[in-house]
Amino acid sequence: LARGVTGPDLAGRHVVVSAGGTREPLDPVRFLGNRSSGKQGYALARAAAARGARVTLVAANTSLPDPAGVDVVPVGTAVQLREAVLKAAADADAVVMAAAVADFRPETYATGKIKKKDGQDPEPVVLVRNPDVLAELSAHRAREGQVVVGFAAETDDVLANGREKLRRKGCDLLVVNEVGESRTFGSEENEAVVLAADGEETPVPYGPKEALADTVWDLVARRLP
Ligand code: CTP
Ligand code: CA
């Protein structure tokens, strides 16, 4: 059982977790991507399953072992992730968006490999906005009382940026961590502050992603109707 938890407090609940990072293709062999490993999302999925929840894990381009007893839905792009998350969220008690979703995608997809041409500069890549899945989930709750959680990696004034983002997204909880240099991406450890729409702020000391996952589920469980 999870640290500090005396029973399967998420039994009978369905939770959805997104993990990893979306890839936006330019042609059959190239994409715009990001450095999210998916480890935090997988830790969230394992922790929720250990606490008795039915878990749907929407996994974007991860290469991690499927957690036991978890329903894994693999996706590639932000548009595919949106579709899979919204479908799973229809009957979910909570949705945690731990995936790094690309803000933009190339406007056009070349069905054949893009080739360089002698003496010619490359064509510019034109980007268009992707849908904001977290904002959409927050604005249109599939179920009354559904708890929606976002993640934000910030630099500079991390807390101020986080508070602003929590308001803008309209989610219930926002897990904010500071990034830069070698922090967070691909690592086993994490440090964060969980900001809640009701004003509660929970610092989580530097430690394993499992500990942060359990703190997130503690905060979610307390807000479930
Ligand atoms: N997110 C999302 N859909 C997007 C972009 C982000 O659902 N198109 C979610 C992420 O999964 C994360 C949260 O929103 O849970 C915050 O992501 P972040 O990139 O920090 O937010 P943005 O609004 O894109 O802000 P920024 O301009 O700082 O990237
Ligand atoms: Ca973003």
Image (cartoon, rainbow, N blue to C red):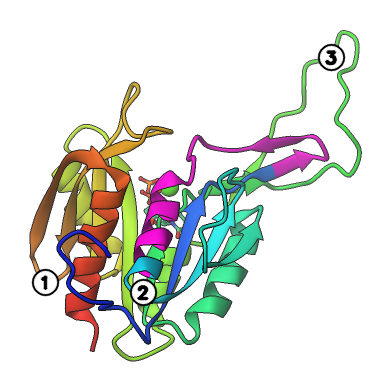
Q: Label 1, label 2: how many angstroms apart (C-alpha)?
A: 15 Å
Q: Which residue is mark 3?
A: 120
Instruction: Check residue 44 for magenta coloring.
Output: yes
Q: Amino acid at mark 2?
A: Ser
Q: Which mark is residue 216?
A: none
Q: Quadrant of residue 2?
A: bottom left
Q: Are marks 3 and 2 in contact (CB under 8 Å)?
A: no
Q: Secondary structure at mark 1?
A: loop
Start-end of magenta stretch: 25-48
Q: Report if the beta carbon of the residue with label 1 is closer than 8 angstroms to ligand 1.
A: no
Residue at (37%, 87%) from the top-left corner?
12
Q: Is residue 155 above or below residue 177?
A: above
Residue at (35%, 61%) from the top-left corner?
47
**Of marks 1 and 3, which one's residue comes earlier in the chain?**
3
**Residue 88 image offset from top left, x and y in percent:** 54, 77
Q: Is residue 160 visible?
A: yes
Residue at (45%, 53%) from the top-left corner?
42
Q: Is residue 86 above or below residue 107?
A: below
Q: Amino acid at mark 3?
A: Gln
Q: Is residue 165 visible?
A: no
Q: Which residue is mark 2?
A: 138
Q: Nearer the viewer, mark 1 or mark 3?
A: 1
**Residue 86 image offset from top left, x and y in percent:** 53, 75
